[in-house]
Amino acid sequence: MNYQIEDKSMPQTGTHTIKLENRKIMSITGVIDVDGFDEHTIVLATSYGIMTIHGNELHINKLNIEEGCLNIDGNVAAIQYSDADVSSKGSWLSKMFK
């Protein structure tokens, strides 16, 4: 995946939590949007910045943008934050519901 990143800070509002069990099952709150994903990388906007999850065999089991919840399973290798906003003309989810 190739993402363009702007130098634009995201506001830190709301509650953002991460629960990772045995590096295999992950629950995240404070999710604003999912910008892209495949089996190795998931990029999402949270209330505390852009979060990138790296690993293998990553699968999104549950996504509820209204509640800000995301559940993932797979082999999590790294979690990375960026204060920058991912620039795009909308997320895959917003494009799907147009």
Image (cartoon, rainbow, N blue to C red):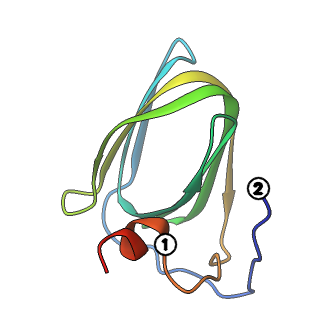
Q: Residue at x 75, y 77 (%)?
A: 5
Image height check: is 45 above or below 40? Answer: below
Q: Residue at x 77, y 76 (%)?
A: 4
From the image, tell me which residue sits under label 2.
1
What is the number of the mark on residue 16?
Answer: none
Residue that extends furthest to the top in the rendered view of this protein: 22
Distance between mark 1 and mark 2 Cα atoms: 14 Å
Whether label 1 touches label 2, CB < 8 Å: no
* Dot 2 amino acid type: Met
**Quadrant in the picture for the N terminus:** bottom right
Q: Residue at x 49, y 31 (%)?
A: 59
Decide if residue 72 is on the left or right side of residue 22: left
Residue 13: image location, x then y, percent = 37, 73
Q: Nearer the viewer, residue 52 or 92?
A: 92
Image height check: is 53 above or below 11? Answer: above
Image height check: is 48 above or below 1? Answer: below
The first of marks 1 and 2 along the sequence is: 2
Dot 2 lies on which element?
A: loop
* Dot 1 amino acid type: Ser
Residue 75: image location, x then y, percent = 62, 20
Residue that extends furthest to the left in the rendered view of this protein: 67
Q: Residue at x 42, y 75 (%)?
A: 95
Decide if residue 68 is on the left or right side of residue 5: left
Other residues around mark 1 within 10 Å, as few (<14) / some (14–19) / many (≥20): some
From the image, tell me which residue sits under label 1.
91
Image height check: is 30 above or below 41? Answer: below
Other residues around mark 2 within 10 Å, as few (<14) / some (14–19) / many (≥20): few
Q: How many marks?
A: 2
Residue 91: image location, x then y, percent = 48, 72
Q: Nearer the viewer, residue 27 or 94?
A: 94
**Quadrant in the picture for the C terminus:** bottom left
Dot 1 lies on which element?
A: loop
